[in-house]
Image (cartoon, rainbow, N blue to C red):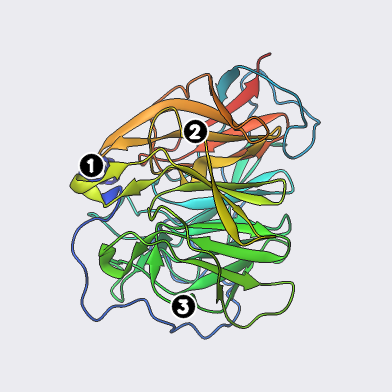
Amino acid sequence: MRRGWWIFAVVLAAVSCGTSGGRVEPGRDGGPDPDGGTVNDGGPDGGPDAGGPDGGPDGGVVDGGLPDGGQPDGGTGGFGSLSWTTLKDRPLGTSEGHGAVVNGKLYTFGGFDWSKACCTPWRFAYVYDPASDTWSRLADMPEGATHAGTATDGTDIYWAGGFVEDASRTFQVFGTVHAWRYRVATNTYEALPDLPDRRAAGTLDYLDGKLHFIGGLSFGQASDTNQHWVLDLAGGATAWTSAAPLPTPRNHLGSAVFGGKIYVIGGQHGHDEGLVTVPDVEIYDPATDTWTRGANMPRARSHITGSTFLFRDRILVIAGEIANGTSITEVSAYDPTRDSWSPLTDLPAKRFSGVAGPILEGVVYTTGDFQVTTYYGVPAD
C-alpha cells in the first residue's frame, strides 16, 4: 500500500502538490495558536516508528569514500564541475521540505506526507551525518509544514511561514504566521514571534543577528508578495519590523548571504498550472536598506528555496522547476564578485523542491520529487 500511495503522490506532486495541492480550507487560518512551549517528546506523528531519535538506518560507506576534512562551506577556490555519487537514502522521501547544515550535518524537516492523498504536511525530521553515512530521526516538529523559509545562524535552525497541517491532519492550510527555532543541541523547538501576516513559499535568511523573511505567497495563494520583514534576534526583538520591499514580488524563490548582503534568486509568479518562472536576481544591502539588480539566471526556475546556498564564495542553485510539473537537473553557480553565472555538472536526476547544502568538501542534495535518494557532489577540478 505504501508503494502505491508513493506513486500516487508523485503524480499529484507533478500536477499540483508541488505548489499548492488544491483547495483552501475556510476557517483554518494557521493563526497564532501554539503556546510557545518547548517540544521535545517527538509529538504525535501517526507515521513510522514513534518519535525521538532512533539512530536511523544502519550505517554504510559512501560510494568511493567521503573526504574527512575541510571547512563547512568547502573552503575557497574556483571549480568548473562536480563529481556526483550517492549517499545513504533518507528514510522517507518527500518534497517541499526544508533544512540547513549545522556542524557538518544536514538537518531536514517537514515536507509532504507521501503516505496520504495530496496534500498533507508532516512533522517528521531527520539529520544526516556524513561521518557514519547515516540518517537519524529527530523529535517531530510542533506542526507539519511545507513551503517554509529556512535559515541558520550556525548553531540553531529557524523557519517561518509555510503551508501547515490542518486541524484533522489530512490536508493543508495555505499560509501561516508561525515562526520557529530548532535548537540543535537539545533537539527541541521554540516558537518565535509571529510574522505580521500569513505567508508561504517565501525565503528566510540570517544576517548579523537578524532574520529576514522575504517575498512568498499571501494567504490562500491569492497573490505574490514583496514584503520584507526583519526579526532582530540578537536585540531580543518581540516583533518583526518592515524593511525595503523586494522589487519583484515572487514565490518559491531562492536566496543566500554573501559579503553582508542578501541575494534573492529566481522563483515564480503565480502557482500550479498558472505559474511563470522568473530569472531575476535582486540584492539587498542592509547598510542602506536598498535593493540592486544582479545578472539574471541563465534559465528561469523556481522551487529552489531549499537548494540555493553559498559554497566556495559562489551561490549554487541545484535543480528546480521550469514549468508546472517540469523539473530539471541543472546546477548553476553565481559569482557575486563578478556578477556572473556559470554551469556546473548536472544533478544525476531531475528534482524540484529538495534540500541541499555544503558538507565537508562538497555539497549534498536530498529528497525532492518525493524521492529518498541523497546525492553528494565534490568539485572535480
Which quadrant would residue 204 be assigned to in this image? bottom right
Relative vertical location of residue 135 with respect to residue 69 in this rendering, above or below: below
Give x and y (percent) for residue 175.
35, 68
Relative vertical location of residue 274 with respect to residue 238 in this rendering, above or below: above
Mark sitting earlier along the chain (3/2): 3
Give x and y (percent) for residue 340.
57, 28
Work out whether residue 80 can be spotted.
yes
Q: Which of 4 and 221 is in front in this view?
A: 221
Q: Could you give the CA–CA distance between mark 3 and mark 2, rounded to whole angstroms?
A: 31 Å
Mark sitting earlier along the chain (3/1): 1
| Mark seen at residue 196 | 3
Whether the residues at callouts 3 and 1 have beta carbons within 8 Å, the answer is no
Q: How crowded is mark 2: few (under 14 residues within 10 Å), some or many (20 or more)?
A: many
The structure residue drawn at horizontal position 38% and vertical position 42%, both measured from the top left corner, is 302
Q: Could you give the CA–CA distance between mark 2 and mark 1, rounded to whole angstroms?
A: 28 Å
Work out whether residue 53 can be spotted.
no
Give the amino acid type for the residue marked by disc 3 in the picture.
Pro
Secondary structure under badge 1?
A: helix
Residue 356 horizontal side relative to residue 362, left or right: left
**Foreground mark, 3 or 1?**
3
Give the amino acid type for the residue marked by disc 1 in the picture.
Gly
Q: Mark 1 points at which residue?
A: 4
**Foreground mark, 3 or 2?**
3
Mark sitting earlier along the chain (2/1): 1
**Foreground mark, 2 or 1?**
2
| Mark seen at residue 318 | 2
Secondary structure under badge 3?
A: loop
Give the amino acid type for the residue marked by disc 2 in the picture.
Ile
